[in-house]
Image (tube, rainbow, N blue to C red):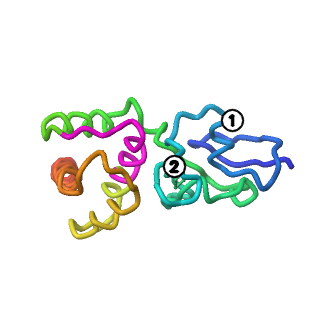
Amino acid sequence: MRIQFFLNNESVETNVPPHLRLSALLDQLDVPSSYLSCHSGACGKCLILLDGHLIYSCLLTVFEIRHHHITTITRWLETEISRQITMAQSILDIGLCPHCKHARYLSLIHFLDRKGRKVSDIKEYLSLVNCSCTSNLQLTKLFQFMDKVRERYER
Ligand code: FES
């Protein structure tokens, strides 16, 4: 089936079975996005944005994304926000494993872009990704640190 959608703001047309998972398509298209692990919505490592909403790409079929906007972490790699997060990790001595790093970055960027974001929202964002490489305490520090950095930019 011919499927058209937008990937990181560029129109993409592809001929694939409609029931193909978006995670598999992104893999086929060689999009360096998120890590695939459970394929069942349990690990959260395949996180992407569908029209600005965080969702697990392994739970979507390509039929469902027709004419929609898919955004992956690729859009922010090599940008100022990624550099700031990397620097914050270094300052706070927080390491993220390669399996969850992109999903964590995407959830953090989504949190920072959220209008009227509250520190109390952080717990909800942390629960999106299930990885034991870094404690929730450390991740909360990273989110809070970046929240303060963003506040300074927003002034
Ligand atoms: S691979 Fe999609 S949630 Fe685990």
Residue at the (33%, 64%) spot, across then down? 115
Q: Residue 94 location in percent, x, y?
A: 20, 40
Residue at the (59%, 53%) spot, across then down? 39
Disc 2, ligand 1: is the CB inside 8 Å? yes
Residue at the (72%, 53%) spot, across then down? 62
Badge 2 crowding class, 10 Å Cα cut-off, few under 14, some 14 to 19, many 20 or more, is many
Q: Are marks 2 and 1 in contact (CB under 8 Å)?
A: no
For label 2, the residue is 46
Q: In the rendered structure, does residue 104 fall within the stretch colored magenta?
A: yes
Q: Residue 125 location in percent, x, y?
A: 34, 61
**Residue 55 vs residue 7: left or right?**
left
| The residue stretch that appears in magenta | 94-108
Q: In the rendered structure, does residue 51 fall within the stretch colored magenta?
A: no
The kind of residue on which mark 2 rests is Cys
In the image, which disc is placed on residue 144? none
For label 1, the residue is 28
**Residue 127 vs residue 147: left or right?**
right
Tell me which corner region of the image, top left, top right, bottom left or bottom right, holds residue 29. Answer: top right
- Secondary structure at badge 1 equals helix
Q: How far apart, in angstroms, are the residues tagged by discs 2 and 1?
A: 14 Å
Tell me which corner region of the image, top left, top right, bottom left or bottom right, holds residue 63. Answer: bottom right
- The tally of labels here is 2
